[in-house]
Image: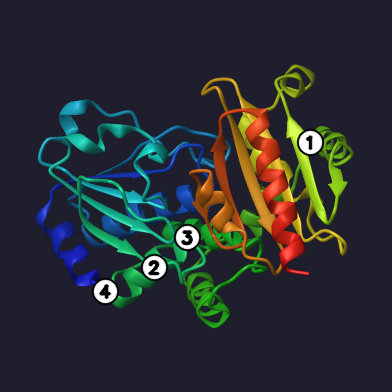
């Protein structure tokens, strides 16, 4: 890949702003903060900002508020997404140049991008950014290592879903040797309150199991029962149906009142499911993907399609 061109762009710009997708997971946050730390570690005189909406994965409150004027003559990176409607903060359009770094299978539709680094063989964008830094002999400090490691851990489901396991484990090993705080990160990611455990029990009991497919529908009522955000329900509850011998595909559908859409999160074991996500305007990984849906009738169509796919793969 054209990593050298990325380095040339970094060298040529004084101001660099890093974007990623909205409703971020830790791969998005980890890639964003990790890249910022790498740039500042190697080029301390640069002005580097990270922007976008915030949630629990912004654990150190790294997201910054900046004025539109900062984008003048700036270089923007967009990480962990290549679809314009999913980018958090569309002011990237104000920048002089845009570089996209992504690992999903979606084609890049960001017209402003002057350089696209995209490789779906990487299991996490954080893995791709680490590879870039290593190939360019850039220093990776302890904080960058920690955030990049966390991005890899979460996007691989704690090393369950990997496209090239040998490379993933090698990169993870390098990051731990550089000081990634593994125990601290695992505690942050996976230790939870008793109340959260009770919430998960509630959602787990609401899954429907039919024809080898599990699905969960969350309308606005669940947000009146619990003080919980949309991301924690949609992304946070989908894998409650994972690891069941009879279930090969599990789905979670959550109404997002703010955007008036239904967020679909789709997961599978052994079966490629991303093509159906793409059919409904979404995308992602072969066995972990999603789509934004317009109605509960469309949700039922998605469930029907996945049941048919499962029959085809028996």
The label nearer to you, 2 versus 1, is 2
Residue located beneath label 2 in the image: 119
Q: Is residue 133 left or right of residue 231?
A: left
Q: Is residue 111 left or right of residue 128?
A: left
Measure the C-alpha gap from mark 4 to mark 3. Answer: 16 Å
225 or 257, nearer to the observer: 257
Specify the label residue 196 is tagged with.
Answer: 1
Give the mark, 2 or 3, whose residue is nearer the N terminus: 2
Q: Secondary structure at mark 3?
A: helix
Measure the C-alpha gap from mark 2 to mark 3. Answer: 17 Å
Specify the label residue 238 is tagged with.
Answer: none
Crowding at mark 1 (Cα within 10 Å: few <14, some 14-19, many 20+): few
Measure the C-alpha gap from mark 2 to mark 1. Answer: 36 Å
Specify the label residue 136 is tagged with.
Answer: 4
276 or 206, nearer to the observer: 276
Estimate the x, y position of residue 31 in percent, counting from the top left.
42, 54
Furthest toward the bottom, the residue is 166
Measure the C-alpha gap from mark 1 to mark 4. Answer: 42 Å
Q: Quadrant of residue 131?
A: bottom left
Measure the C-alpha gap from mark 3 to mark 1. Answer: 26 Å
Q: Secondary structure at mark 1?
A: helix
Callout 2–callout 1 Cβ contact below 8 Å: no
Measure the C-alpha gap from mark 2 to mark 4. Answer: 17 Å
For residue 203, say whether it is visible: yes
Residue located beneath label 3 in the image: 148
Give the mark, 2 or 4, whose residue is nearer the N terminus: 2
Q: Is residue 269 left or right of residue 205?
A: left
């Amino acid at each position: 890949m054209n990593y050298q061109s990325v380095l040339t762009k970094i060298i040529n710009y004084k101001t660099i702003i890093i974007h990623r997708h909205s409703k971020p997971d830790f791969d998005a946050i980890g890639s964003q903060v990790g890249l910022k730390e790498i740039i500042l570690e190697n080029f301390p005189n640069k002005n580097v900002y990270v922007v976008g909406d915030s949630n629990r994965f912004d654990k150190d409150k790294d997201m910054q508020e900046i004025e539109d004027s900062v984008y003048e003559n700036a270089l923007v990176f967009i990480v962990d997404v290549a679809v314009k409607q999913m980018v958090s903060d569309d002011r990237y359009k104000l920048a002089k140049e845009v570089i996209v770094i992504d690992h999903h299978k979606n084609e890049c539709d960001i017209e402003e991008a002057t350089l696209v680094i995209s490789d779906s063989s990487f299991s996490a964008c954080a893995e791709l950014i680490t590879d870039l830094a290593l190939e360019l002999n850039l220093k990776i400090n302890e904080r960058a290592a920690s955030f990049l490691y966390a991005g890899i851990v979460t996007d691989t489901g704690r090393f369950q879903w990997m496209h090239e396991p040998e490379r993933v484990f090698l990169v993870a090993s390098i990051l731990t040797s550089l000081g990634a705080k593994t125990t601290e990160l695992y505690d942050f990611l996976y230790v939870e309150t008793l109340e959260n455990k009770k919430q998960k029990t509630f959602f787990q009991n609401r899954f429907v199991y039919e024809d080898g497919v599990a699905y969960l529908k969350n309308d606005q009522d669940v947000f009146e029962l619990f003080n919980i955000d949309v991301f924690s329900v949609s992304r946070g509850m989908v894998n409650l149906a994972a690891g069941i011998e009879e279930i090969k595909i599990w789905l979670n559908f959550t109404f997002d009142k703010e955007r008036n859409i239904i967020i679909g999160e789709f997961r599978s074991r052994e079966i490629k499911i991303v093509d159906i996500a793409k059919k409904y305007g979404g995308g992602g990984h072969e066995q972990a993907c999603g789509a934004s849906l317009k109605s509960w009738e469309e949700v039922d169509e998605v469930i029907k399609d996945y049941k048919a796919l499962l029959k085809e793969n028996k």
